[in-house]
Image (cartoon, rainbow, N blue to C red):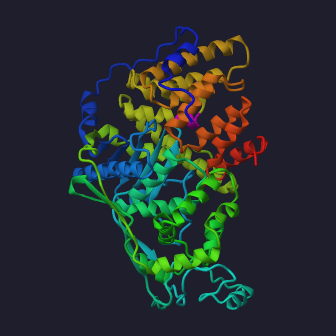
Amino acid sequence: MHLVAGPLSALLAAAAAPPQTAPAAPQAAPRPDVVVRGERERPGRWQEAETAHAVLVGDGARAELVRLARDLETLHLLLDGLFGRDGAADDAVKLRVTLIGGTAEFAAMGLRNLRWQQGPFLPGFGTDRYYDPRQDGAELATTRVDQNWVIARGWSMQSLAGINVPGLAVGGDPATGAAAAAQGQSTALLGLADSAFAVPPSGEVSVPARADAGLFAAYAQHWLLTYYPAAYPRWYLDGFGQVISTLRTRDGGRMAEYGRAPDGADRVLGRVGGYPVTDILSGRYVADNGVAGARRGWTPVHAWLLTHYLFFDDVRRPQLRRYLSALAEGRSSSEAAAAFGEPAALVRDVRRYHGARKPFLEIGLPAGRVADPLVRRLSLGEEAFVKGRVELGSRVEPAVPGLSAREAERQARARDGWLAALRADAARRPDEGAAQRLLAEAECRAGTADACDAAAAAATAASPGDPAALAWAAAARLRRALELPAGPGREAALRVARAAVARANRADTDAVLPLLLYARSFEGAAPPPLALDALARALDGVPSSPATRLELADALAAAGRGAEARSVLLPVVAGPYDAPEKGPAERLMARLPARAP
């Protein structure tokens, strides 16, 4: 949605009243810690590589960081070309990618994926991946070491053939299928070719899962949710990521290929077995596999096979587009699935596809389109808070609805402990801008007004003129103003807060937070057109953010623009992920006028 063009700094400044004299931020007193401060400014192990569309941070080898940064930029260029948006305007905030050393180190961070979920896949096929479409910019964290997908010990399934639907037996005998269905057996299986796979022996079997493949899959999903946000089914996003995950570049980035089968795909499909295609298209597989002890096995390879077929088949590809378009318009899963025609025909076609040689694409890229990233080594002080920035999204979020009282209390204790440790670390580094900015964000998102005020003041003292510090200082002023009772005093405080927001916007016209703060300054009142423009610009920056979608839709509904609010909400209400904003979005959607038939 593009309601305004160009930066809003002039508009926000004009909308705010003439700035009143604001209390100066407290200045840090001189401290005799020159030696300690110099130690913190020494280069650390972590490095940052920035490209046109992403910022990668990792503590591995520089050459590997540069390679991954170039490959992500190549992938972005490739996707732009495939989807016909080469050269299109790009207002999106750069994705920040943090590469964690290993699985144990990743697990120790205790990250909770609240706005992104995978599968649910068979145990052993998970990925160490965290994705958080935060309002001010999406964060991705993953490991930088290769792993294995482990097929659970003791799997023993008879040889099964093809992909069918309930009532249509293997081999196409409806009578056999009906008898099996009557006995509660499902013959709707995806991904096996005739009797090519025998009963596996007992014992663990694993297939390699490359770290860079997981990164490419995650970036592809982020790209799709950013540039073509819609109500996608989760199986499609998982499959889309897997199809792109086998990206390979060569000749200095002048050639790229994608679409090959993941390593060990035949072994996975042979050992795990198939999956009912009707359950996939209906979305039932999400609920089935979310139940402990479910017998069926859904894996990333299953998602790859179905998506690969629909992508590369000339007949099915237009059907896939119609299916996705129907979902994007709010149609039901069954209505959308009608785009594929007769289910039995789809069954037979996928069965044939599994045993056939599969195409992949090799694409030449213009020389010089992918530049080397800008690389810098973080200081010891900066790198001390790299993981904290990632953890922030998991730590300060409220408990997910539906948790038991005991689990909610456990999460609250974990949050309070994390905040206490962050406060202690920040107190030991009063001049470290990264520390004070992180604490200001944490306190303003989770703490009291007093804590938000103090942390924001420390952030501006440590980094005078820093756009993020100015934004959190504005957030603190706005929070104080909104807590005042209605009247002239509240309006005067809001004018001061809006002036602070305008200063933060001028410091960085691409930053999302000042836009959000300006819109929030009209809480409890009908939002003026400029507030709607600010929210629309914020959504342009991070289209995958369900929180911004909810804020914009609520403001549009208050302005009497229900049809637009419904369109903004649909990716949250009917999309692939169960975000904390989904419940409020559903309730808001229920109050909006019904969609025109």
Q: Relative to 215, is 539 on the left or the right?
A: right
Check if residue 233 falls in the magenta segment.
Answer: no
Residue 407: x and y in percent read 64, 56
Residue located 60% across and 32% down the image: 448
The magenta segment: 442-447
Which residue is more in the foreground, 117 or 369? Answer: 369
Residue located 73% across and 44% down the image: 589
Tell which residue pokes out farthest to the front in this image. 315
Q: Is residue 543 at least partly visible in the picture?
A: yes
Q: Is residue 442 at least partly visible in the picture?
A: no
Q: Relative to 424, is 295 on the left or the right?
A: right
The answer to whether 31 is drawn above or below residue 370 in the figure is above
Which residue is more in the foreground, 220 or 406? Answer: 220
Q: Relative to 159, is 29 on the left or the right?
A: left
Residue 113: x and y in percent read 53, 54
Report the magenta stretch's main SS: helix
Q: Quadrant of the N terminus?
A: top right
Tag count: 0
Quadrant housing residue 373: top left
Residue located 51% across and 49% down the image: 225
The answer to whether 438 is drawn above or below residue 30 in the figure is below
Quadrant housing residue 106: bottom left
Check if residue 446 falls in the magenta segment.
Answer: yes
Residue 36: x and y in percent read 27, 33
Residue 504: x and y in percent read 47, 22
